[in-house]
Image: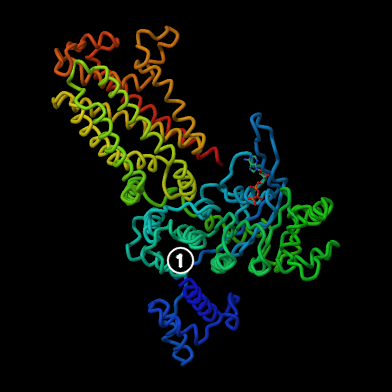
Amino acid sequence: MEIIQQDARNIALSNLTLSTSQSPPVYNPTTVPINHHNRDSLHTNGNSVINNHTNNIKNDTNGHHNHVDEYQLRPFRNLPTKESVDIQFKDVTYTARVGFRKVKKEILHKVNGKFPGGQLIAIMGPSGAGKSTLLDVLSGYKKSNVNGAVYVNGRIRNADSFRKMTCYITQDDRLQLLLTVLENMRIAADLKLGVNTAYEKKESIIEDILTALGLYEHQMTLAGRLSGGQKKRLSIALELISNPTIMFLDEPTTGLDSFSCTQVVQLLKQLSEQGRTIICTIHQPSAKLFQQFDQVYVLAQGECLYQGSPNRLVQYLQSIDIPCPMYHNPADFVIELASAEYGEDKIQSMVLNMSNGECTDWFSDKSKVLKLEQLRIKYPIAKIENGSGNFHATSQFHQLKVLLRRGYIRSKRDTTLTHLRIASNVIVAVMLGLLFIKAGNEGSRVLDNYNLLFAILIHHKMSTMMLTILTFPTEMSVLIKEHFNRWYSLKVYYASVTIIELPVVTIACIMFTIIIYLLSAQPMEWNRFLMFLAISWLTVIIAQSLGLLIGAWFDVVNGTFIGPTMTVPMMMFAGFGVRLKDLPDYLKWGSHISYLRYGLEGYVGAIYGNRSTLDCEMKAYCHYRYPQKFLTEISMEGDKFWTDFYALFVTILLLRLACYYILRWKIMAVR
Ligand SMILES: Nc1ncnc2c1ncn2[C@@H]1O[C@H](COP(=O)(O)OP(=O)(O)OP(=O)(O)O)[C@@H](O)[C@H]1O
């Protein structure tokens, strides 16, 4: 199927190049095997889009040109070509702060460069050369600790308007794996295209992009089941929806086989030929891929070794007395040079000859490289400053609706977060219920019941918090990408995360409470049951908020350590092992901040508060016939329910607020 699609795209591309005589041919028709065998195989496949191509070809050979033009498939026909944008940068320096003492480490050393619009540009270099850093700086992803100037069409880059015309595609494909290709595309379209865009228009854009990227046949496949190359193409497809003028891609070919690499690079080439400026980092391209780029920019140790046409690299190396050995892939050779395999002096010599990226002698067409003044004349202000409008394409309310829809689909399919959560709650409730069966009303089993209440509290706390700690860091990476690409605002995202989990945790909590309440035979009074449920629910929400906070702050490994570790002091201050009145004075403050204390006190209040006597049927000696005796012994009062309720509620508000600010800080900190 993949091969057939590739053929179909090739045919589409050759149609495109045949019909636009002024643009340079992308594919040489003689090298694209549009032969009878292909036609037959395409025909037998029954794919209507592909059949259209073959019909076109046949018609073409029969000379019915009008008919051909009418049905000719033009990739991205729904994404109008935009005026290309020229990027230049001067003396760009990036300094990172390394280690505990935040020692400064300069990673980019006053690099310069000129990336004319409408070109496919590769930033190359060995590992650690600074490719990703340069890409991050140019795209505006990295903002702090950057010095130097980035010019867009000859003018100093305005961060906000620049972000409106760009997209950034990360090396790892941060996709919604539980959504199909089509669902991913529809969500992206709903967020990235204005609400005024008609349904048919959105669908046409999606269909167009999927067809051109060879994903049309896979539109019903879950993104998680796509191959590496397909995932990469889907990442590109999602961002193409808003028709960006400039695309930044971090290592789009890493991890792909050579066929998928070629597919991705050919796709990028095609996009650049439609006026987009495509800048990507690439590790070590094959000789064939290397030739596909219009311009390459080679970095070594944060400095520029070469900038210009890939076809002129050999000539350049010759000119500085570092000849590329015969039959050696020039791309490999320049990376070997950049890795200092032939000595540091070669690197220095190349940097000097290139004036660290100032030199433009090795461009294939020097006339395309305009000076900043020329660019400012070519692109008058009115043309580049496109819009003082909203930063996001849609309103916050609309974003929330779309994110809730996405969250709903995911919740339905997410076996861990939804199904497992409900299943684990039911299983634990049954097990605990059977262990403490009929302990709730029995005066001789009050201590057992007290243990049960604490066990319930810890269950709600740990199961909810750990699930969130384990899953949220993955979400974070998607959030960072989508937020940077202006899909939605952080506030809306946060609101959607808060809302979307509520039904599932509430259902799980209600099921747990009903089972445990009945099995352990707690008092059959509605108000006590509702009090019990309320405390359980608030504890679950606190645990979820803590999970979000820790998940936003730390990675999975550190989070799984910190989460349980932070729970221990809260347990200590809950009044369970050590009674509250026995806490040393210097630790008394701990009981005021322990949500587990309020949870336990709330449970005890719900079950034993304002209750005169308990049943005494199981044993002859019934120590706690009068619950007040038990309350006095554990130094709790049975009428503090509302204090506990409000304390838990305020804890939730504070945690949620803290979590939002940590998320915001985290998003800014990575940049
Ligand atoms: N925030 C940072 N703190 C410390 N060091 C950093 C930071 N960002 C980048 N570096 C260092 O800067 C150098 C360049 O990193 P960068 O990721 O840009 O390299 P790269 O050329 O993209 O490498 P690769 O191909 O392996 O991804 C590396 O040595 C890296 O460790």
**In this picture, residue 210 sits left or right of residue 18:** left
**In this picture, residue 497 sits left or right of residue 125:** left
Q: Would residue 137 be visible to someone looking at this image? A: yes
Q: Amino acid at mark 1?
A: Leu
Q: Which residue is mark 1?
A: 79
What quarter of the picture does the C terminus occupy? Answer: top right
**In this picture, residue 23 sits left or right of residue 361:** left
Q: Would residue 373 be visible to someone looking at this image? A: no
Residue at 60%, 58% (x, y): give it. Answer: 279
Image x and y of residue 602, in percent: 26, 20
Quadrant position of residue 508? top left
**Vertical arrangement, residue 502 with respect to residue 405, above or below:** above
Image x and y of residue 433, in percent: 24, 30
Residue at 41%, 34% (x, y): give it. Answer: 547
**Vertical arrangement, residue 257 with respect to residue 19, above or below:** above
Residue at 64%, 67% (x, y): give it. Answer: 289
User: Which color mode does the image show?
Assistant: rainbow
Image x and y of residue 412, in percent: 31, 50
What quarter of the picture does the N terminus occupy? Answer: bottom left
Quadrant of the rendered image holding ligand 1: top right
**Vertical arrangement, residue 574 with respect to residue 548, above or below:** above
Quadrant position of residue 447? top left
